[in-house]
Amino acid sequence: MADTDAQVPVVTEEKKTEKSILTELPKVIQKSQINDGLVHGLNEVVKALDRKEAQLCILADNCEESKYTTLVEAFAAQNNIPLIHVDERNQLGEWLGLYKKDEEGNIRKLRGVSSCAIKDFGEGSTALEYTLNYAKEHSK
């Protein structure tokens, strides 16, 4: 009886610790924002990539301008900066906190962002380790 009781919490903890880039990347973004280490917008992202200040770059796949995507990918590849692709501009904008909420707490005005660059991660965390490993595995 004691053996089965001891195994139950372990199984539930394993389910809680399932990680994906969609759960860990927002944590990394939030920490870097707190430490003032995040830039977004084409001009700022390209500057950070060109000066090799960026440690990680995030690019939305549904960017409206193909030249924008090509430029950011080229600068990241040229300077060996890891690049993570996310599906939605709006999702990236939500992670960056670029929205307004109504009285009920629902997101009302959401501004999409095509790219952002992280210059300072802040303190280390398991989310950061997971994100950096993901970036290394999925880099082109």
Image (cartoon, rainbow, N blue to C red):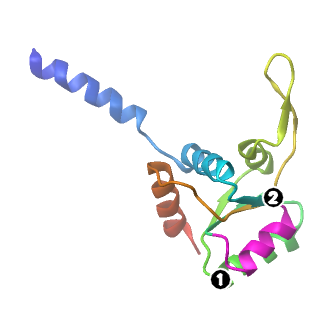
Residue under the point 75% across and 80% down: 50
- The secondary structure type at the circle numbered 1 is loop
Residue 52 x, y percent position in the rendering = 67, 79
Q: Mainly helix, strand or loop, the magenta region?
A: helix
68 relative position to 50: left or right = right
Q: Dot 1 corresponds to which residue?
A: 79
Give the camera-side residue of 71 and 44.
Answer: 44
Magenta highlight range? 41-54
Task: Indicate the amino acid at tag 1.
Answer: Asn
Residue 54 x, y percent position in the rendering = 66, 70
Q: Dot 2 corresponds to which residue?
A: 114
Residue 103 is a magenta residue: no
Q: Nearer the viewer, mark 2 or mark 1?
A: 1
Residue 47 is a magenta residue: yes
Which quarter of the rendered picture does the C terminus lie within? bottom right
In the image, residue 19 sits, relative to residue 84, either above or below, namely above
Task: Indicate the amino acid at tag 2.
Answer: Ser
The answer to whether residue 72 shows anywhere in this view is: no
Residue 83: name its quadrant: bottom right
11 relative position to 112: left or right = left
Residue 53: name its quadrant: bottom right
Circle nearer the N terminus (2, 1):
1
Residue 95: name its quadrant: top right
The reply to whether dot 2 and dot 1 touch (C-beta < 8 Å) is: no
Which quarter of the rendered picture does the N terminus lie within? top left
Q: How crowded is mark 2: few (under 14 residues within 10 Å), some or many (20 or more)?
A: many
State the CA–CA distance, disc 2 to disc 1: 20 Å
- The secondary structure type at the circle numbered 2 is loop
Give the camera-side residue of 112 and 35.
Answer: 35
Label for residue 30?
Answer: none
